[in-house]
Image: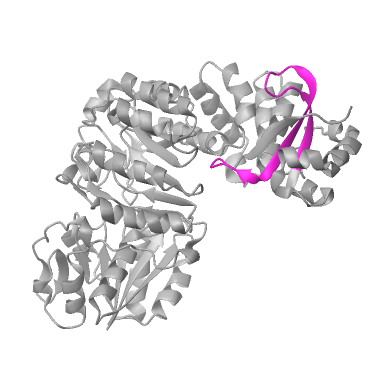
Amino acid sequence: MKTVFAAINAKYVHTNLAVRYMQCLAEQHGGYETEFVEYTINHRILQLMREIYLLKADCIVFSCYIWNIQMVLELCEELKKVSPNCKIVLAGPEVSYDSEQLLEKYPFVDAVIRGEGEPVLIPFLEWVNGVCTAEQVPSLSWRSENGINSTQSAPLPSLDVLPFPYKDLNELGGRILYFEASRGCPFRCGYCLSSIGTGVRFMPLEQVFAAMDIFLANKVRQVKFVDRTFNCNKNYALAIWKYLSEHDNGVTNFHFEIAGELLDDETMDFLKTVRKEQFQFEVGVQSTNNETLAGITRKTHIPSLFEICKKIDSFGNIHQHLDLIAGLPYEDKKSFANSFNDVYALRPQQLQLGFLKVLKGSAIHRQKQEFGIIYTTRAPYEVMATKWLSYDDILSLKQTEDMVERYYNSGRFSNILEQLVPLFATPFDFYEQLGSYFSQQGHHLKNQTKEQLYTILRDFCIEKGLQFTDFMEECCLLDICLHEKPKKLPEFIKNRLNDDYQKQIIEFYDNTENITRYLPEFEGENGKRISRIAHLQVFAYDMASGERKTTAMLFNYEKRGLTGKAESFEIVIGD
């Protein structure tokens, strides 16, 4: 009997841990025919139907989350029509809370695995293969002639049972590799499902180190730890961070979701020593309104947290992603704007503006009537209004989020934003008004090229009665050059100086001393080829000071950081 574990990810670059764990554990025990497959929510239902049907499985287990559950249900309904004898089983956080109600509602689903799958796997496979009955499988809810049935939940597993989930890292080039060193969270945030669990379990450090050795040896691009609060145990987190630092391969970036306020002086002293861009921290601020934080049982002293974030930023070696959630209790639009401005002032590499998801089983779900929360009936159960935010407010914040994603988080507009944002009363005012303009012009209904996004910024500035200066134009040109060799420029950008200095630019690339000094990795290459890999741009301003002064900058596109920006130098060309 063949069992297929299927994942439908949000994006191609993502990888699914759950289906890999199941496949690896099944192989370790032997005797079971299993396979795992991964798709994305961008695939069409009929395309997925074809691919899964042709696997000729006797049982298909889908990994279910808020971002894929609607697609999974639609797919399962159609699959059952053409494969009526195939067991269709759902598993994962989105179906673990109300499994019996789900089975009653969707007759094409045969069973649900509740909670963590590792202790359930072998009894489950024995049931699929007819070795035991469903009653002998823990954490299982299933449909039978007698109705809907459920067994008792299995004890939570020790994390030492988890196998290394990636067989062939060469096949996963360019994708984000997920890893977990712990499960559970010590905090009780009202919007999070981790709040209903008990305690935190940790993988043995030796097992973590062995896994890290594999990632480091293969020089993977990024490993993202999915631990809810990676540094909830200081000594455990510090041991892993020190190991990664001591065994650094100079390439791999590690992403951690942390509680910034837990970082003490010893940890901070260590963090300032790690390689630039080796670590990336995601810090959930969520709100700077104390009443809101109390309402979601989040004990964060915002001034202390911000001081730590500023100190990390001063090290210049760790990227920080700071998160806000719109739609939390006691936070109206004005309060949210204050939270936004507070976080924006920290200048994180990413400012993630999310919207409350009312997850089944969470405290917020139980308090939805108290807080007047209206949310979408279907996943992802996203907030549409609260006592403090109208639907109009939510729509406005959605526009603001879109602008933050396109302009701030993309990292492609950093220099022009430095000039434009201070022209408005607050950063929130800038992004809110830009979002309103973007929508009024109908730009949100079309795909915008990179060049068009610069033009929209300029047009918005003029619409607001502000002068779009020559230096602002040069800032746009600098932002473009930092990310790619400029070929097609927005119409308003003039590139006269490079035409005037064409002879000196050619001579620069042909000068071996220049190549040795600025581009040593290209030594021995001819100047024409180097000019196709790097770019030399002449500006009418000193781009650091804003002083009107002819300045040349060299951009090396072979060397890019996490933000995608090219390594750049100010140089001297000509006489």
Give the vertical position of 161 relative to 449 (above or below). Answer: below
* Left-right relation of 147 to 17: left
Give the image quarter of residue 478: top right
**Image quarter (top left, top right, bottom left or bottom right) of the N terminus:** bottom left
Number of marks present in the image shown: 0
Which residue is painted at 40% across and 38% down in the image? Answer: 281
Which residue is painted at 17% across and 44% down in the image? Answer: 196
Residue 431 at x, y = what percent?
A: 53, 28
Give the vertical position of 549 relative to 359 (above or below). Answer: above
Do we see residue 542 in this rendering? yes
* Magenta region, residue range: 535-563
Do we see residue 229 in this rendering? no
**Image quarter (top left, top right, bottom left or bottom right) of the C terminus:** top right
Which residue is painted at 58% across and 45% down in the image? Answer: 445
Give the image quarter of residue 259: top left
Residue sitting nearer the eye, 564 or 559: 559
Residue 423 at x, y = what percent?
A: 60, 17
